[in-house]
Amino acid sequence: FTSYFHDGHFSPGLENEYNFDWINIGNGFFVIEFSTYVDAITMVMLPVVTIVALMVLVYSTGYMHGEPRYGWYFAVLSLFVAAMLTLVLSGNLIQLYLAWEGVGLASYLLIGFYWERQSAAEAAKKAFITTRIGDVGLLIGIILLWRATGTFDIQQIIAAATSGQIGETYLTVAMIFLFGGAIGKSAQFPL
């Protein structure tokens, strides 16, 4: 991994993006693309997520051995990993939001894995409610950015923000909602 960066294969400013129309209504009137965007931050986060996920999966094989819902556990854990990797690779805010919801669903299912235990069921319910509040913040931030730019594409939104197309106050409010969504989802601001 380090040699890949060292040899100049991926230098700052060299981004790779792949897009295709996922939803196209009215011959381009309303288009949502499926988009993967890889830049230097993505190249750092992909191995971090993958290595941590691999360690959890390997550890879990022994820890969960003998569990009656062994297969279900790994299915939900795989959903979590897939959603997290999709989140890291997302090139647009709709895809990011759907991956965000996938992470939330998988978290809820993992926290409540032992649903027959009252404490696990209550913890899953509390996590579900807390993350829904964060989801609303993220969704409001996404809608504000879309209204200001007319696009869900993250790179186009960044370009609009840096060029001054979005007013500073409006951008600040949108970012507060996005940040609030992130801290709500990660339970840094619990209920």
Image (cartoon, rainbow, N blue to C red):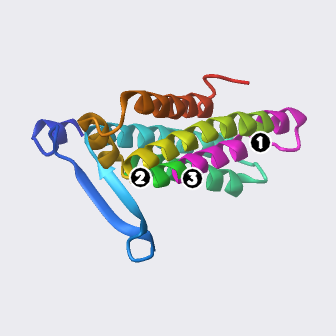
| Residue 164 in the image, given as x and y percentages of width and height | 28, 35
Which span is picked out in magenta? 98-123
> In terms of depth relative to the viewer, which is nearer, 152 or 131?
152
Q: Is residue 103 magenta?
A: yes
Quadrant placement of the C terminus: top right
Let me know if residue 64 appears in the view.
Answer: no
Label 2: element kind: loop
Mark before the other along the chain sequence, 2 or 1: 1
Q: Which mark is residue 152?
A: 2
> In terms of depth relative to the viewer, which is nearer, 165 or 100?
165
Compared to residue 77, the image places residue 33 above or below, namely below
How far is the residue under mark 2 from the one under mark 1? 33 Å
Identify residue type, mark 3: Ser
Question: Which residue sits furthest left?
Answer: 7
Where on the picture, by quarter, is residue 163?
top left
Q: Which residue is mark 1?
A: 112
Name the residue rendered at 76%, 53% in the picture. Answer: 69
Identify residue type, mark 2: Phe
Determine the main secondary structure of the stretch shown in magenta.
helix
Question: Which residue sits furthest bottom?
Answer: 27
| Residue 57 in the image, given as x and y percentages of width and height | 55, 45
How far is the residue under mark 3 from the one under mark 1? 16 Å
> In terms of depth relative to the viewer, which is nearer, 57 or 20?
20
Name the residue rendered at 17%, 37% in the picture. Answer: 12
Identify residue type, mark 1: Gly
Label 3: element kind: helix
Compared to residue 177, the image places residue 71 above or below, namely below
